[in-house]
Image: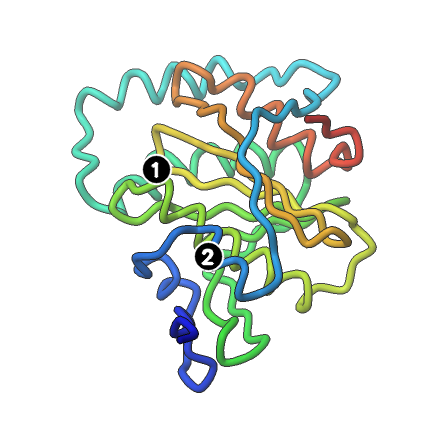
Amino acid sequence: MPKLPIIQPNQSYTFADYFRLNYAPSDILSHFQVTLKKQFLQFPEHSQPLDRTADLQSRIEESLPRLSLTSEMARREFLIAPVLMEVLHYTKATLNVEYPVAVSNLLKGSLDYFLQAENTLLVIEAKNEDLERGFVQLAVEFIALDSWVETEQPTFIGAVSTGTIWQFSRYERSARQVTQDLTLYRVPTDLSILLQILVGTLQGYTSQLTD
């Protein structure tokens, strides 16, 4: 007897709905003919020093002991947004917050943070501080972007963040493969390398990514 599909084609799903599905990420992605890999990825660093990193790190370190980070709004406003504002300073990218996308009834919703410069970068806040489920949502948003944006960019880069932890992923459009990086970057400890990756990605270094 064939198993029931985990995604019902006659129903409507938002990106947030995939976060809530209690199925293996590979099973969810297979519905869209996308494969999943997990491995350590190496990202190229931006070639020049980012001269404001030390100041941002100092401000975050000073604020963290006094911040209550139990709400999504607090994590987004006081940890994720300041990092992305620094990225905008160095890249002159455009940042869309809660960017609406509607490809089909199975692929629709709002992207938390969608940055565009020479390349695009997608960042989502991991609800309930759950990186694994946040990754599933990010992967589905990659699939939607593949049909939504008009770009020759062969690879999309994205990140899931709890505010204090960031995890990157990449989507290879021609191969329809999502790779989840096994490295976790912590804020404020790894802020410098995190910013180097975010800035480098937007400035067009994604073609240099290696396994």
Q: Is 66 on the left-hand or right-hand side of 79?
A: left
Q: Residues within 10 Å of mark 2 (few under 14, many from 20)?
A: some
Q: Residues within 10 Å of mark 1 (few under 14, many from 20)?
A: many
Q: Residue 130 lies in what quarter of the image?
A: top left
Q: Residue at x 66, y 68 (%)?
A: 148
Q: Which mark is residue 209?
A: none
Looking at the picture, how far across and down is residue 198, in whole percent? 60, 32
Element at label 2 = helix
Position of 93 relative to 211 (above/below): below
Q: Nearer the viewer, residue 5 or 148?
A: 5
Q: Residue at x 63, y 50 (%)?
A: 94
Q: Residue at x 65, y 49 (%)?
A: 177
Give the colour scheme shown: rainbow
Q: Residue 86 lies in what quarter of the image?
A: top right
Q: Which residue is mark 1?
A: 162
Q: Is 164 on the left-hand or right-hand side of 51?
A: left
Circle 1: residue type: Thr
Circle 2: residue type: Asp
Q: Residue at x 72, y 46 (%)?
A: 155
Q: Give the number of marks.
A: 2
Contact between labelled residues 1 and 2, with CB atoms less than 8 Å apart: no
Element at label 1 = loop
Q: Which residue is mark 2?
A: 27
In this rendering, the label closer to the viewer, 2 or 1: 2
Looking at the picture, how far across and down is residue 6, in whole percent? 39, 69
Q: Residue 46 lies in what quarter of the image?
A: top right
Q: Is 52 on the left-hand or right-hand side of 27?
A: right
Nearest to N terminus: mark 2 or mark 1: 2
